[in-house]
Image: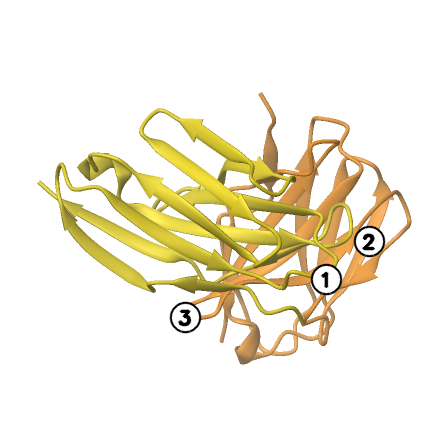
Chain colours: A orange, B yellow
Amino acid sequence: DVKVTQSSRYLVKRTGEKVFLECVQDMDHENMFWYRQDPGLGLRLIYFSYDVKMKEKGDIPEGYSVSREKKERFSLILESASTNQTSMYLCASAGLGYEQYFGPGTRLTVT
Amino acid sequence: ILNVEQSPQSLHVQEGDSTNFTCSFPSSNFYALHWYRWETAKSPEALFVMTLNGDEKKKGQISATLNTKEGYSYLYIKGSQPEDSATYLCAYDTNAGKSTFGDGTTLTVKP
């Protein structure tokens, strides 16, 4: 069974703080993704990675960066959190079949 | 940004009704089409991945068809049950590994 875990289910941060969201998968998948989900906007891709130390911008990368130092771990970084980054963040990984396996999500509130 | 459209946005049916939703996507540069099921308070789970024009997939009472030439896929649920209530997402791949998601169809099945 594929398992994708995220470091927190709920997180509250203040404006201007640096925020790290961690994602770990245990199936040796090459591809990993970070999405945010907002009401009425569906899933929007922030960044993805095809391999260690490789990253590609998704549709809404502004205000975010990522890090993939190990194959199993993909981190999303908010350098200076803002209130418009309050959202549900979902991590996913994918292997050869390309269907994505999602983590439980992190609901981030920036006050 | 690729345009993936799903309709209807929401659907309310009675237990036992059969229903279907539509996903439309660009017909050029097609690689794969995914359907996911997303229940409240859970993570999205993969239902089907289809890659060839004319593909049909079935899982229990849920089935899907694919037309890559005209750019659409249908998801059918025969004899809906309350436990089928969820948001159904489709996702379109052009390059292996990156998906563009539609906004989803939210199905509510009333007992």
Q: Chain of mark 3?
A: A
Q: Which mark is residue B101?
A: none
Q: Position of residue B14 (x, y in %)?
A: 11, 46
Q: Amino acid at mark 2?
A: Ser
Q: Chain of mark 2?
A: A
**Residue nearest the viewer, comparing B7 with B42:** B7
Give the labeled residue for mark 1: A77
Marked residue chain, label 1: A
Q: Position of residue B39 (x, y in %)?
A: 36, 44
The residue tagged 2 is A67
Residue drawn at (30%, 39%) of the image: B77
The 10 Å Cα crowd at callout 3, few under 14, some 14 to 19, many 20 or more, is few
Q: Residue B66: x and y, percent?
A: 53, 45
Which of the two discs, 1 and 3, labels the residue nearer the N terminus? 3
Asked whether A8 or A69 is in front, the reply is A69
**Both on one chain, marks 3 and 2?**
yes
Per the rendering, the mark at residue A40 is 3
Please report whichever mark, 1 or 2, sits nearer to the chain's N-terminal start.
2
User: SS for tag 1?
Assistant: strand
Q: Residue at x 68, y 33 (%)?
A: A25
